[in-house]
Amino acid sequence: MIKLTKLNNEEFVINCSQIMTIDIIPESKITLMNKEHFIVKESVDEIIRKTIEYNKSILDFRHSNMI
């Protein structure tokens, strides 16, 4: 789950594993697997960075619980 910002400055959380595409329009338009879409202020690079950080946190958590 990653926190993003709609154009009206409303923050929301999205399941990043459901992202199908991100279009630059010049904002970022996220389309989910269910075809729902969101336009957000964050750049594609920011969304990718947040997704990587989230996925890393899951892996780190799993690894720490295996020891």
Image: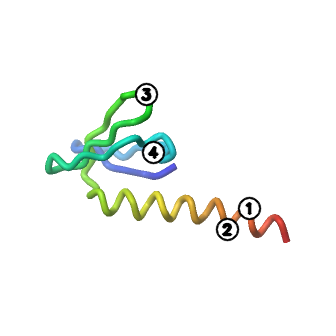
> Label 3, label 4: how many angstroms apart (C-alpha)?
16 Å
User: How crowded is the residue under tag 3: few (<14 C-alpha within 10 Å), some, or many (20+)?
Assistant: few
> Label 1, label 2: how many angstroms apart (C-alpha)?
5 Å
Check if mark 2's residue and mark 3's residue have beta carbons within 8 Å. no
> Label 3, label 1: how many angstroms apart (C-alpha)?
28 Å
Which is closer to the viewer, label 3 or label 4? 3
> Label 2, label 4: how many angstroms apart (C-alpha)?
21 Å
- Residue at 24% from the left image edge and 48% from the top image edge: 28
Mark 2 element type: helix
In the picture of the structure, the residue carrying the numbered disc 2 is 60
**Residue farthest to the left, as pictured:** 26
Check if mark 1's residue and mark 2's residue have beta carbons within 8 Å. yes
In the picture of the structure, the residue carrying the numbered disc 1 is 62
Q: Which mark is on residue 13?
A: 4
Camera-nearest residue between 35 and 10: 35
Q: Which amino acid does label 3 sit on?
A: Asn
Closer to the N terminus: mark 4 or mark 1?
4
- Residue at 31% from the left image edge and 43% from the top image edge: 10
> Label 2, label 3: how many angstroms apart (C-alpha)?
29 Å
Q: What residue type is labelled 1?
A: Arg
User: How crowded is the residue under tag 1: few (<14 C-alpha within 10 Å), some, or many (20+)?
Assistant: few
User: How crowded is the residue under tag 2: few (<14 C-alpha within 10 Å), some, or many (20+)?
Assistant: few
* Image location of residue 39, percent across then percent down: 26, 41
- Residue at 66% from the left image edge and 63% from the top image edge: 59
* Image location of residue 66, percent across then percent down: 83, 66
Mark 1 element type: helix
> Is 25 positioned to the left or the right of 35 in the image?
left
User: How crowded is the residue under tag 4: few (<14 C-alpha within 10 Å), some, or many (20+)?
Assistant: few
Q: Which amino acid does label 4 sit on?
A: Val
In the picture of the structure, the residue carrying the numbered disc 3 is 34
